[in-house]
């Protein structure tokens, strides 16, 4: 995490219309693991991205076909199954980030910190890398008693219309990272969604509302949070 630049505007930033390949790669793995290879063919064909099913991308990719794939998942599969697949793809993406993108020493440090401090540090790191998962969307984060992530004009649900929040993949990526590094009891909920006509996709990470209040580990990690909220901008 110490290697992370404080802003994503440094040189080397890719075109804003690109997104990390794990949004595709881990979705393929999730479909495979669920035994949904035939549905995967249909989904990628409908998204005009069959090439990627045969040979998954390995570098930053145009966000538009990625959005088409994610939206095709939500059209082709029954809603509960689509949610399960997108959640698994997000969890796998989080695992990839933990295995390859956040130094082990930084992870060890975060794990022994009070949850509120770990949450702020993780939020800064996520913000610095927002371009890898938010593409052309406008990302911001606010860290306080909980952490709120916002993606305005989220490219993965661009042009999509639904009567519910659809961005399960993003919520799942955030949740996996928070569960590993802040508190295993973190829940990330998408509270508003662009696909529903809201002003942005808004995700709330909450590690303080713990079902099992008697859990000693959890109570230790949810100590009172000092200081006001701070807004961390991606750009
Ligand atoms: Zn959304």
Image (cartoon, rainbow, N blue to C red):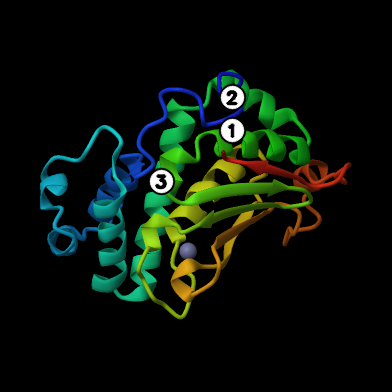
Q: Against 127, is 12 above or below?
A: above
Q: Are marks 1 and 2 in contact (CB under 8 Å)?
A: yes
- Can residue 33 be spotted in the picture? no
Give the distance between the C-alpha atoms of the residues marked 1 and 3, in whole angstroms: 16 Å
- At label 2, counting other C-alpha atoms closer than 10 Å, the crowd grade (few under 14, some 14-19, many 20 or more) is some
Residue under label 1: 125
Element at label 1: helix
Give the distance between the C-alpha atoms of the residues marked 1 and 2, in whole angstroms: 6 Å
In the rendered image, which quarter is residue 67 located in? bottom left
The residue nearer to you, when weighing 213 against 92, is 92
Give the distance between the C-alpha atoms of the residues marked 2 and 3, in whole angstroms: 21 Å
Quarter of the image with the C terminus in it? top right
In the rendered image, which quarter is residue 11 located in? top left
**Which residue is painted at 69% across and 40% down in the image?**
119
Element at label 2: loop
Q: Against 78, is 214 above or below?
A: above
Quarter of the image with the N terminus in it? top right
First-in-chain label (2 vs 3): 2
Q: Against 113, is 134 above or below?
A: below
């Amino acid at each position: 995490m110490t290697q992370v630049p404080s802003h994503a505007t440094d040189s080397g930033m890719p075109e804003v219309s690109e997104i990390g390949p794990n949004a595709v790669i881990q979705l393929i793995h999730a479909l495979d693991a669920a035994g949904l290879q035939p549905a995967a063919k249909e989904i990628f064909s409908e998204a005009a991205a069959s090439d990627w099913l045969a040979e998954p991308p390995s570098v930053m990719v145009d966000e538009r076909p990625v959005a088409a794939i994610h939206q095709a998942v939500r059209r082709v599969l029954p809603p509960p199954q689509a949610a399960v697949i997108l959640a698994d793809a997000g969890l796998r993406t989080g695992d990839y980030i933990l295995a390859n993108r956040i130094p082990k020493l930084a992870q060890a440090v975060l794990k022994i910190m009070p949850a509120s401090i770990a949450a702020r540090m993780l939020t800064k790191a996520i913000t610095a890398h927002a371009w890898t998962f938010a593409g052309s969307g406008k990302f911001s984060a606010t860290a306080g008693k909980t952490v709120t992530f916002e993606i305005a004009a989220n490219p993965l649900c661009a042009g999509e219309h639904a009567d519910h929040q659809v961005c399960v993949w993003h919520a799942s990526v955030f949740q996996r990272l928070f569960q590993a590094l802040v508190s295993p009891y973190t829940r990330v909920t998408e509270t508003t969604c662009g696909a529903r006509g809201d002003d942005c996709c808004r995700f709330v990470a909450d590690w303080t509302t713990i079902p099992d209040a008697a859990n000693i580990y959890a109570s230790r990690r949810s100590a009172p949070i000092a200081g006001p909220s701070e807004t961390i901008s991606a750009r």
